């Protein structure tokens, strides 16, 4: 069984969309895959209750309990590895990860970013798109590399920027597309043929 571990920090709306897609599209049957656990760095993350209601194991690894980013990432990796993950999915996980953590999950760590990368990496993406006069915004699903919001692009979707858009209205429209595109990108990743083993 391919175990998927999802990391969240807040409402978990993308996580919930992934869980719904896995059930609706029969990922267990099609890909021999399941959502094994949802882990958050915040005990009050609303998404944890959503996961528990679906019978998914949850865990909290609170970043505030650690003195350094490296110590937190080490504890987080131990919690993830206890699930024997095939894939680790960042779904609104609001932490910058250390190079050692990223290297540990190289090729099996995915993220979704609310812009059409390489445009607008980092924060305030929607406001920055509006201020730049963009006619189109969007989202990107990508493999995580050490460089923030870079890495191989797996999927993108464009969303028009309306003349009266605010950062909040644009964010809401982009999020609706995230809920569709992220599960599709994960399913496509799971459907990849396994790499050949050396003779």
Image (cartoon, rainbow, N blue to C red):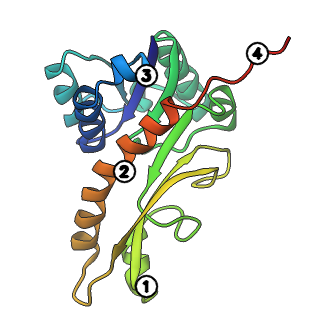
> Foreground mark, 1 or 3?
3
Q: Of callouts 2 and 4, which one flags the residue occurring earlier in the amino acid sequence?
A: 2
Q: Of callouts 1 and 4, which one flags the residue occurring earlier in the amino acid sequence?
A: 1
Q: Quadrant of the N terminus?
A: top left
Considering only vertical position in the picture, is 154 above or below 166?
A: above
Which is more toward the observer, 92 or 76? 92
Please report the residue visible at 32 percent of the width from the left and 32 percent of the height from the top. Answer: 42
Please give the residue where the numbered disc 4 appears in the rendered image: 197
Measure the alpha-carbon separation of dots 2 and 3.
18 Å
Circle 2 SS class? helix
Question: Do tag 2 and tag 3 residues touch (Cβ < 8 Å)?
Answer: no
> Foreground mark, 1 or 4?
4
Do we see residue 37 in this rendering? no
Measure the alpha-carbon separation of dots 2 and 4.
31 Å
Please report the residue visible at 47 percent of the width from the left and 38 percent of the height from the top. Answer: 188
Q: Is residue 44 left or right of residue 8?
A: left
Q: Position of residue 144 (x, y in %)?
A: 59, 43
Measure the alpha-carbon separation of dots 2 and 1.
21 Å
Please give the residue where the numbered disc 1 appears in the rendered image: 134
Do we see residue 170 in this rendering? yes
Extreme-left residue of the structure: 53
Please give the residue where the numbered disc 3 appears in the rendered image: 31
Circle 3 SS class? helix
Please give the residue where the numbered disc 2 appears in the rendered image: 181
Question: Do tag 1 and tag 3 residues touch (Cβ < 8 Å)?
Answer: no
Please report the residue visible at 30 percent of the width from the left and 43 percent of the height from the top. Answer: 14
Circle 1 SS class? loop
Q: Is residue 66 left or right of residue 199?
A: left
Circle 4 SS class? loop
Q: Position of residue 118 (x, y in %)?
A: 59, 66
């Amino acid at each position: 069984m391919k175990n998927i571990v999802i990391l969240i920090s807040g409402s978990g709306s993308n996580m919930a969309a992934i869980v719904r897609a896995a059930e609706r599209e029969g990922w267990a049957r099609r890909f021999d895959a399941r959502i094994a656990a949802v882990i958050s760095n915040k005990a009050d993350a609303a998404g944890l209750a959503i996961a528990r209601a679906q019978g998914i194991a949850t865990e909290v690894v609170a970043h505030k309990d650690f003195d350094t980013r490296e110590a937190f990432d080490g504890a987080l990796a131990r919690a993830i590895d206890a699930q024997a993950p095939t894939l680790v999915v960042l779904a609104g996980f609001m932490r910058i990860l250390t190079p050692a953590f990223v290297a540990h999950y190289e090729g099996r760590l995915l993220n979704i970013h609310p812009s059409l990368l390489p445009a607008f990496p980092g924060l305030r993406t929607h406001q920055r798109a509006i201020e730049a006069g963009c006619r189109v915004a969007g989202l990107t699903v990508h493999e995580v590399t050490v460089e923030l919001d870079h890495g191989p692009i797996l999927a993108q979707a464009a969303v028009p920027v309306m003349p009266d858009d605010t950062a909040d209205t644009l964010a809401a429209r982009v999020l609706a597309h995230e809920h569709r595109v992220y599960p599709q990108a994960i399913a496509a990743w799971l459907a990849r043929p396994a790499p050949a083993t050396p003779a």
